[in-house]
């Protein structure tokens, strides 16, 4: 006969995540675990995240996560070629869609951003190539020890923001762009203690110490 002790199942070990993930929020945890900080090189996904980060301006990320499925339906599964052709009637209809953020400027900017996105694709071959060229194709691994160290923007996001604005993009301020870089894995900002944390390369640690001296 098997012992009672052998028959007992151990409770699952809770993963330790970055401090910004609310306890008990399954959707937030899934986003953190499966998406945030993981390198994205697919153009449609890059357009999706650029749209969602812009839509978040002034709102919480949890609000956008809850509306994500509705955004995919409203914006043609984030196909930039289709969104770029949305006319005034289509945009007016979106203002009545309760599933998304009904803000005229954000809706209009999604359409104009799709047009600018296509222009970048035409110039660079893909938006992915344009974006990853800023970091020579490799993610920036910061290796922050604590959440309070993570900046809202950086010199990198400043430069990308300025360039995107010159190309006609809207809702691409430096803070929004830094959040975007984190989301699509151009920057890895999982903090120490998180099970997805990665230590920065030795050269980056040396450069950081030198900048503090």
Image: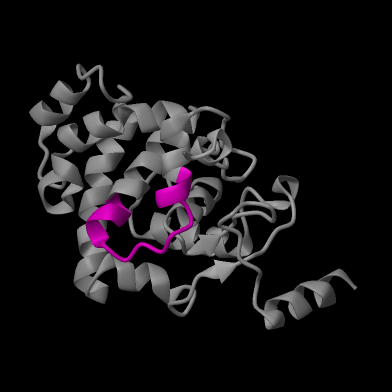
**Picture quadrant where residue 23 is located:** top right
Task: Name, please, the residue furthest toward the front.
Answer: 1
Q: Please say which color scheme the image uses.
A: one colour
- The residue shown at (58%, 37%) is 5
Q: Is residue 128 visible?
A: yes
In magenta stretch: residue 35: yes
**Spot occupied by residue 211 in the image (x, y as percentages of width and height):** 81, 73
Q: Decide: is 190 above or below 200.
A: above
In magenta stretch: residue 44: yes
- The residue shown at (28%, 25%) is 100
Give the left or right position of residue 120, taking residue 26 as reference: left
Q: Is residue 171 visible?
A: no
**Picture quadrant where residue 18 is located:** top right
**Spot occupied by residue 155 in the image (x, y as percentages of width and height):** 62, 63
Task: Name, please, the residue furthest toward the bottom.
Answer: 203
Q: Quarter holding the C terminus? A: bottom right
Report the magenta residues as a range.
32-47
- The residue shown at (41%, 33%) is 27
**Spot occupied by residue 160 in the image (x, y as percentages of width and height):** 48, 62
- Give the camera-side residue of 146 and 52: 146
- Give the camera-side residue of 209 and 159: 209
Q: Decide: is 49 above or below 181.
A: above
Task: Name, please, the residue furthest toward the right.
Answer: 213
- The residue shown at (40%, 40%) is 54
Q: Decide: is 111 above or below 132.
A: above
Q: Decide: is 29 above or below 169.
A: above
Give the left or right position of residue 38, taking residue 112 as reference: right
- Give the camera-side residue of 123 and 210: 210
């Amino acid at each position: 006969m098997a012992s009672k002790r052998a028959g007992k199942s151990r409770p699952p070990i809770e993963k330790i995540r970055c401090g910004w993930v609310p306890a008990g929020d399954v959707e937030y945890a899934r986003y953190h675990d499966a998406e945030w900080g993981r390198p994205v090189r697919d153009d449609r996904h890059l357009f999706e995240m650029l749209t969602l980060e812009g839509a978040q301006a002034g709102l919480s990320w949890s609000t956008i996560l809850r509306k994500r499925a509705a955004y995919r339906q409203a914006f043609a599964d984030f196909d930039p070629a289709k969104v770029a052709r949305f006319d005034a009637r289509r945009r007016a209809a979106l203002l009545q869609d309760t599933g998304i953020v009904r803000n005229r400027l954000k809706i209009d900017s999604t359409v104009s951003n799709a047009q600018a996105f296509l222009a970048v694709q035409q110039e660079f071959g893909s938006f992915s190539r344009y974006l990853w060229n800023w970091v020579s194709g490799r993610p920036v691994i910061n290796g922050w020890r604590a959440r309070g160290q993570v900046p809202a923007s950086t010199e990198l996001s400043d430069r990308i923001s300025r360039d995107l604005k010159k190309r006609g993009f809207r809702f691409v301020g430096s803070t929004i762009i830094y959040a975007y870089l984190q989301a699509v894995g151009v920057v890895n900002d999982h903090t120490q203690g998180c099970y997805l944390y990665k230590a920065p390369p030795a050269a980056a640690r040396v450069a950081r110490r030198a900048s503090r001296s």
